[in-house]
Amino acid sequence: MTRRVVLWTCALSVCLAVPGGLWPSGWRWAGGVLGGAALLGASAWVIRDLVEGLMGRADDAGRRAVDAGGPAGGRPSRPVPAVSWLLVKCFTRHVMLALAAYGMMVRLQFDPVALVVGVTAPVAAVAAEAVRLGHRGS
Amino acid sequence: MSTRRSVLSMMFGFFVLGLVAPAHAQEAAGAVADSGLVQWSIITAGFALAVAAFGAALGQGRAVAAAAEAIARNPGAAGEIRGALILGLVLIESLVIYVLLVTLILFFIKPFGG
């Protein structure tokens, strides 16, 4: 499902960005749409890494608890990142995301409405996927 | 209960400070015709971002709590729950990014002049 949402998002963003690039100075619109989608994509990347890191830690703790009674003696099966490191990465990436939004809007002067439209693209992709799944289920 | 009261009093304090600060600023910059509108738009942007962050934190906390409970009840469905959790968190985050963009527009693009 997630892979399909990503595909929908890419298709929607390109479909929304290409018509903007057809007229002069339309690159601001196109860049805004693609930049907005990239912002939400970066946000999704941050969240996915954090959730998978935390759940990986939980998995590893459970595995160690099971192994503690067996011959393995409760040693970690693979190196797991510390929670503090995961949080530092998450907050640093969020700061980078905010700086990227600032740079796109103020320095590159992308169209603000296009940025909002670009952020909407993944949401519309999720809605489209939900509708598709609903039709398939009924 | 006391925690809730202290949080509410802090929020009220911030609100009062937000009301007082532009009143002082307006006296200094009274010559500019629509400076009040600019100041109010900046204050609104700040409050909007604060409210958005508060609501998103609340929603994401509830989502993570529900997902953790669901995984504890049914560890076999952890993969599907994880996917749904990530999707939900991203959708909640998208609302904050909307507000961040609107705030940046109000701060830097200044659609109301200033």
Image: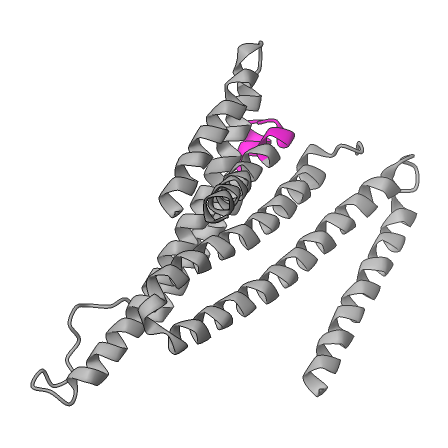
Q: Quadrant of residue A127?
A: top right
Instruction: State the residue in front, B36 or A2.
Output: A2
A34 part of magenta stretch: no
Instruction: Tell me residue A114's x, y (percent).
Output: 60, 29
**Residue at 55%, 29% in the rendered image:** A32
Instruction: Give the quadrant of the N terminus of chain B.
Output: bottom right
Instruction: Tell me residue A93's x, y (percent).
Output: 43, 51
**Residue at 49%, 36% in the rendered image:** A37
Classified by dominant secondary structure, the portion drawn in magenta counts as helix
**Residue at 89%, 54% in the rendered image:** B23
In the image, B89: left or right of B48? left
Instruction: State the residue in front, A93 or A23.
Output: A23
Residue A2 vs A64, above or below: the answer is above
In the image, A67: left or right of A121? left
Magenta range is A103-115
Instruction: Tell me residue B73's x, y (percent).
Output: 40, 77
**Residue at 27%, 72% in the rendered image:** A59
A104 part of magenta stretch: yes
Chosen colour scheme: one colour
Q: Quadrant of residue A90?
A: bottom left
